[in-house]
Amino acid sequence: MIPLVAVVLALALGAVLVRLGGKSPVAAYSALVRGAFGGIGNIAETLINITPLIFTGLSVAFSFRCGLFNIGAEGQLIMGQVASAWAGFALSGLPAFIHMPLALGAGVAAGAAWAALPGYLKARLGVHEVINTIMMNYIALYLSHYLVIGPLKAPGPLPVTPTIAPGARLWRFLPPTRLHLGIIVALGAVWLVYYILFRTTLGYEIRAVGQNPEAARYGGISVRKSILVAMIISGGLAGAAGAIQVLGLQYKFLDVFSFTGYGFDGIAVALLGRNHPLGVLVAACLFGTLARGAILMQSIAKIPKEVIGIVQATIVLFVAADEIIRRLVAPRRKARVATVAGAAPGDAEGGDGDAT
Amino acid sequence: MTFPGVVANDNVSIDVYPGEILALLGENGAGKTTLMNVLYGLYKPDRGEIRVRGKPVVIRDPNDAIALGLGMVHQHFMLIPPFTVAENIVLGTEPVGAGGVLNKARAVKDVKELSARYGLAVDPEARIEHISVGMQQRVEILKALYRGAEVLILDEPTAVLTPQEVEELAGIMRNLAGQGKSIIFITHKLKEVMAISDRVAVLRRGRVVGTVPTRETTPEDLARMMVGREVVLSVEKRPATVGDVVLKVEDIHVKSGRGLPALKGVSFEVRAGEIVGVAGIEGNGQSELVEALTGLRRVSAGRILVGGADITNKSPREVISHGVGHIPEDRQRRGLILSFSVAENFILERYHKPPFARGINLDLQAVKDYARRLVSEFDVRTPSETVRVGALSGGNQQKVVVARELSLEPRLLIASQPTRGLDVGAIEFVHKRLVSQRDEGKAILLVSLDLDEIMSLSDRILVLYEGRIVGSMKAEEATEEEIGFLMAGGRHARGSGAEAEGETGTGGERGADAGAGNEAGEAVHAAAYLSAT
């Protein structure tokens, strides 16, 4: 409910900005819609945009479920890219049904390993994961930079790895578009995360620790183990985002120079999706569509795509500060309830906070 | 007054007369504290008016309340620990000397005069952090009197006191009433209402269900008004048939969260078929004891044996697997995951075992079946097992915890404050369940700050004071005085003699004053029509 209102309000604000800039909001948004959905080619590109956001959104959401804030999806994604590229070009002669999963697995493993370290430090020593994952982002960035101008560099002037073997690539199933198997893998990940969280004992532990570590410990759950496992899975999902980009689109690792942004957008996607796998899917679709549509909006309607950046930021702001919307939507909610919580307003507040 | 979605006080009217002690009786959540916070200007009524001496007034904040002669003694004291008694009392209205400097001598003199006039013995120069809780409460009362309070509102004043201190407080209250002050005494303890008050206003679900003179009522009547049905006040139990030793604690030493020694060599046993009660004032090592026994806190020395097996410093899961059930003192912080459903909370300790776990999977059907069974067996009032536990009332939340722990079929049940914050009906439920567990041959360790609870449930009583067991006795041989004496560390409660005299001296005038106030009509009249609509 609140995310929906946030999106509508943010789009309305975008329209106002376009109007202030002397352009027509109708033209802007129709160009945006055409850019995202106009023809099979655009739809394919939109889906390609959405794919990594699903993974990073799931990554951040998964760690949130355990009460952890993994800001390191960006670095884990970079490590996933490097590892997948390496597994893609270093191995050869393998059949595709082995090589492709192997290269994908390498990316997942690299991301998981990159998250395991801050996870371990948090579980063992209580070092806050936010600080460590941020630092790990920079280590990943510069390490990848070193690798791609050093040990993993392809012959030639560019800071790039050799191209991966054809057998490691994700199948492009809708030629001539670039749409590849990654989107299917992403949908599989949505289901997998849902399953882990809500259908397994591991998910129960992780959610218990995230909601009330004290009660989890009381119930016999190992809080440390849950934290470590949650970070590893979260990192694996971010690593998969990187792997998919390399194996489905780029076919090599190109020095990124600066962060791709997918990891950070994953935070917004998780927030908007309320840390639920299906919510993440919807939010990733929205953000991916906006980003894709913005490019065409800029070229057709001559409206700077930064407007869409503002819209996205506004969505995040409204969702994060959901009290704003709560007051807009329901200025005075007054219901007579039989139970009386006069002496325990804490209960009522708790209910409010989680009802969304 | 309305909280989001809730009417805390609904058309409540009460009035108080000079020289009168009015008890405001109600269960937790009945709206007592809300009502008083409205009087003190902390909350605003949605409707209605407050009259003081017959004149309608508007109380926007505590300063208005103080100016009108209303004084409040909160449940949790609002004192500054490193400051002296005198400094705390004059805080905010300090006597100021030349150059804006605090006139300490004057403050001390004022406080001495005040304490002599009302018979509240305090040492003005002592620091708050060095005096007892009972003394701190007197400081709070003096603080209100110093500001010229004519009406004193005491919010659950006895919760933190030993029985002796409660006696002293009762004396103080009668003395103050004798000097013409009005006292509103908020409580949910029937015994204290009967012993101390002149009139009782009973609140239920935010409404005043009746106001009666204390001498014309009985505890049973009051309980019925409070709960809305007949309640069995005493715990019925047969003599215990005691079996083998289940829990054996040998000289354990445990440190508190701040690294200070909390238990300094505690040894005791609990046998099958008996309830052993641990009495003590809050903060004497009870929490650390329970945590050590359940694997939640490290034991630095000594041994804990359950059924002969050493569980010292084992993980909580290992302790549970040895047949130890634990009803924790704080159900919201430790006992439950409030955002989880009732069903999910039921499996907190056994989700990893069949039938709930099948390999890595959680068998949701088994979880659901189990939850439905416990909901009906323990009469948990919830629309369904999928409801968030946080949405249930405190009593039903506790039922979820009790149901979960008892269905573990533990041989040792550790119940820490099992009825804290529960209403009379829920307390009855928990007590019955504990006794029936005992009769089934379970060993039960009951830790409670409520001495009445300890006295009525236990077969044996241990008294914990400053991390040591200072007393051990059979329940039928124990007296409240003796336990209270031990709870206070064996030192006799301070200055009780003087107040006891004051009490008898003024007792006679009290009734007359109340009557006079009634007729003269110069009553402090608080008629607050508070409503949601």
Image: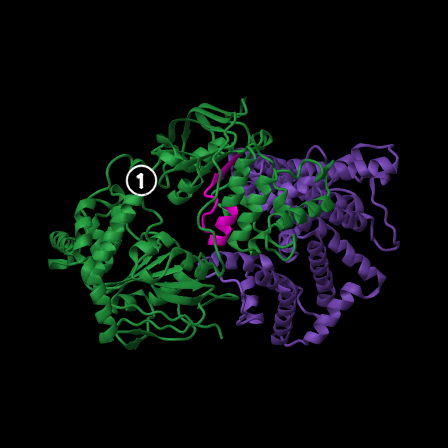
Chain colours: A purple, B green
Q: Position of residue B237 (x, y in %)?
A: 48, 41
Q: Which residue is mark 1?
A: B484
User: Residue B197 vs residue A206: left or right?
Assistant: left
Please, what secondary structure does the residue beneath circle 1 have? helix
User: Residue B138 vs residue B41: left or right?
Assistant: left
**Which residues, given as a range, are shown in magenta?**
B413-430
Report which quarter residue B101 is drawn in. Answer: bottom left
Between B506 and A267, the residue placed more toward the observer is: B506
Total number of numbered discs in the rendering? 1
**Which chain is home to disc 1?**
B
Between A169 and B320, the residue placed more toward the observer is: B320
Q: Is residue A230 visible?
A: yes
Image quarter in which the N terminus of chain B is found: bottom left
Between A231 and B447, the residue placed more toward the observer is: B447
User: Residue A32 vs residue B412: left or right?
Assistant: right
Report which quarter residue A144 is drawn in. Answer: top right
Identify the residue at image location x=47%, y=47%.
Answer: B419
Residue B395: within the magenta? no
Q: Position of residue B284 (x, y in %)?
A: 36, 37
Residue A177 sits above or below residue B52 on the image? above
Q: Position of residue B153 (x, y in %)?
A: 30, 61
Residue B429: within the magenta? yes
Residue A87 sits above or below residue A321 on the image? above
Identify the residue at image location x=51%, y=59%.
Answer: A349
Q: Dot 1 surroundings within 10 Å: few (below 14), some, or many (20 or more)?
A: many
The residue under label 1 is which amino acid type? Gly
Report which quarter residue B133 is drawn in. Answer: top left
User: Residue B375 vs residue B168: left or right?
Assistant: right
Q: Is residue A138 visible?
A: no
Q: Position of residue A219 (x, y in %)?
A: 58, 38
